[in-house]
Amino acid sequence: MIELKHLCRDFGEGKLTIHAVNDVSLTIESGDVFGVIGFSGAGKSTLVRCINLLERPDSGTVLIDDVEMTALKSGELREARKKIGMIFQHFNLMPSRTVAENIAYPLKGSGLSRQERDEKVRELLKLVELEEKEKAYPSQLSGGQKQRVAIARALANDPKVLLCDEATSALDPQTTKQILKLLKTLNEKLGITIVLITHEMAVVKEICSHVAVMDHGSVVEQGDVYSVFANPKMQITRNFIRTTSNLHKMEELIEEGARIADLQPGELIIRLSYVERNVAEAVISQVSRRYNVDINILFANVEILQGSQLGGTVAIISGERADVTKAIEYFIEKNVEVEVLKDGRVSDPADA
Ligand SMILES: Nc1ncnc2c1ncn2[C@@H]1O[C@H](COP(=O)(O)OP(=O)(O)O)[C@@H](O)[C@H]1O
Ligand SMILES: [Mg+2]
């Protein structure tokens, strides 16, 4: 549906040039909910603005539904843009117009009769579940309601693509969930392809099928959400993922000398991570039985992402040293990643 090839967009001149988008190539399939994640300043907004040519790329091509957007003349571009809706962090509604007037705005010049237009607005209000707010003004709405109006307006011309630039970043967590759920419903019901820009990994986890990670203008990692979460290749991706799980708290606890991290001789603190789909959870009890080791779970964070378990466990493992070694080898054989965070035998140099 969307194909970006070698997109570049610079700002500034000479020594002060910022490569806001630096040679980005991406393919987004029809029906995807495609997340683009990165820290502030990574180039995400510039990238989405290049998709609908609000920002003209300095080089590279944008193809949408096989139409080369970058080659269109201004009149053709105006038409083509109607097939791309966009919503923003701060909603961008017109404060002096009612909800219905805001939604009807993009239908100006569409050739619809007044009656057809009213009908369309009602249909859109129903879709975003705001029928009773038709005559309200934006200032009378909550943040979530404002974003619903913005979504309805973005859908007025039946776009094939919806671009969302930090669309939930100004909303509280519960409202965020509701808006994400609405976007997912629209994706499924209307088959609309969604490109969702965010700086929050939790948003990606909630609704995206694919994700691209941006850093300093470049896409540094991309793939289906499960693979990227389970096997992040880049440090920046790991940092994002850590914000959504407590599995990396253990290092902090060890560093702080927390009591939970105190070990008896022969004990090890290990972190087990599920990095492949369909790893059976029973593997911990199997290992314990087979190798006569004790596994005391300190904490765990396992969830279901795209139908497969993702996450892991931090535990203290103890037993005969040879058995512990075999147990760890067994985990690895079963595609469970093992990291030894602390080894009771060598933690105190005086004992080593
Ligand atoms: N219109 C502009 N003029 C100059 N610099 C800009 C402009 N828009 C964005 N930038 C710069 O480009 C970089 C990427 O910005 P942006 O795309 O907004 O990142 P993000 O959305 O990931 O926070 C930043 O360094 C930003 O300061
Ligand atoms: Mg931005």
Image (cartoon, rainbow, N blue to C red):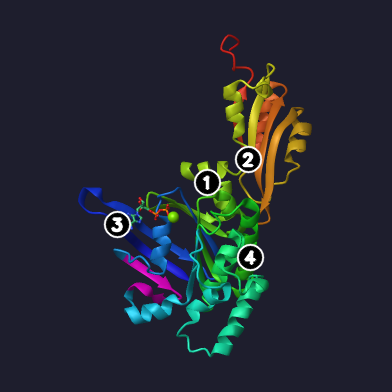
The local crowd at label 2, few if under 14, some if 14 to 19, many if 20 or more residues have their Cα within 10 Å, is many
Q: Is mark 2 within 8 Å of ligand 1?
A: no
- In this picture, is 259 found above or below 20? above
Q: What residue type is disc 2 on?
A: Ser
Rendered image: mark on residue 138? none
Disc 1 C-beta below 8 A from ligand 1: no
Locate residue 34 relative to residue 343 in the image: left or right. left
Mark 3: few, some, or many residues within 10 Å (few <14, many ≥20)? some
**Which disc, if any, is residue 182?**
4
Q: Which residue is mark 2?
A: 273
Residues marked 1 and 4 touching at CB (< 8 Å): no
- The amino acid at mark 3 is Asp
State the SS at label 2.
strand
In 3D space, how far apart are the residues under numbered discs 1 and 3 (Cα atoms)?
Answer: 28 Å
Q: Residue at x 54, y 76 (%)?
A: 101
Outermost right residue: 289
Label 3, secondary structure: give it: strand
Check disc 4: other Cα within 10 Å, few if <14, some if 14-19, many if 20+.
Answer: some
User: Marks 2 and 4: in contact by CB < 8 Å?
Assistant: no
Q: Nearer the viewer, mark 1 or mark 4?
A: 4
Report the residue at 59% width, 17% height from top: 346
For the residues labelled 3 and 2, the Cα–Cα distance comes to 40 Å
> Can you identify the residue that label 3 sits on?
10
Which quadrant of the figure shows ligand 1?
bottom left
